[in-house]
Image (cartoon, rainbow, N blue to C red):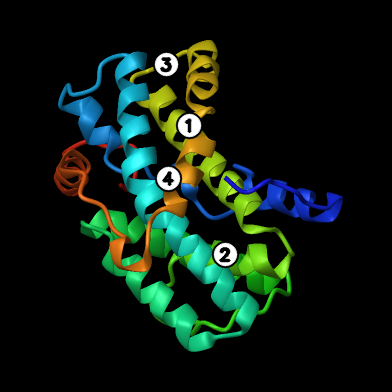
Amino acid sequence: MAAITTTDTALLRLMQLSSVSLPIGGYAFSQGLEYAIETGWIKKSQQVSEWLEQQLLYSVAQTDLPLLKLAMAAAEAGDEKRLMQCNDLALACRETRELRLTDSAMGEAMNRLLVSLGVSQPLPIFGELSFVVLFGIAAQNWQIDYPTAALGFLWSWLENQVAAATKLVPLGQTQAQLLLGELQPLLPQAITRAEQVTEDEIGNGLQGLAIASAAHETQYSRLFRS
């Protein structure tokens, strides 16, 4: 994995991008976790850990991180056509309506935020926008290098998922912190794994995740949008 180096300003911007207080609604999406718990696939902390590990290494590292890298490169080059291709590919990789909603709803919120912060982004303001692509545009604009941006992206994803599990399993606050500590070492592994993924290989096939997400669309009682 490439060495992570950043300036103080870029680091502060990364913390801003990765913060759970960022008004993009990441806390509203369980990404299939709510159904997995409702149906009994997941009942305890260790099973949450295994679920998130699989998703981290074989979904996020296989899809989101390579897309983030491509988007940052396109943003640096000022290639609007390439950014649009990244956006379309990101949305096409979402296997269910709800997983696509997760990406596009957070993307819409991120776009509004960037406009408010005075960050220009070349994608059309209408239509579906991918959160991961807009995250890449923001990171590039704020001169955050890719390995650092990827780490921040992963941390934000992981923290939101553990927060969802805290409410749903439920987990105690101490258990949640132990779970975060257990999964943290996987973040650099995910970045290294993503480095091996070519553009033609972007995508994932976690059947359990897809089934859980699709079933959640008609789940009778739920706390999360996906």
Give the residue type at disc 4.
Arg
Query: Residue flagged by tag 2: what amino acid is it?
Result: Gly
- Of labels 1 and 2, earlier in sequence is 2
Q: Secondary structure at mark 2?
A: helix
Which residue lies at the image location 43% right of the left edge and 35% below the top edge? Answer: 161
Q: Is residue 169 left or right of residue 68?
A: left
Residue 136 shows which numbered tag? 2
Query: Mark 4 to mark 2: distance in Å?
Result: 18 Å
- Using the image, tell me which numbered label, if any, was put on residue 121: none
Q: Residues within 10 Å of mark 3 (few under 14, many from 20)?
A: some
Q: Closer to the observer: label 4 or label 1?
A: 4
The answer to whether residue 128 shows anywhere in this view is no
Question: Mark 3 or mark 1: which is in front?
Answer: 1
Circle 3: element type:
loop
Give the residue at x 20% y 27%: 38
Q: Which mark is residue 171?
A: 3
Mark 4 vs mark 3, CA separation in Å: 29 Å
Residue 181, x across and y down, in percent: 55, 20
Q: Which residue is mark 1?
A: 186
Q: Residues within 10 Å of mark 2 (few under 14, many from 20)?
A: many
Mark 4 closeness class: few <14, some 14–19, many ≥20 residues within 10 Å:
some
- How many angstroms separate mark 3 from mark 1 (CA)? 21 Å
Residue 193, disc: 4
Residue 50 or residue 120, whichever sits in front: 50
Amino acid type assigned to the residue bearing label 3 in the image: Leu
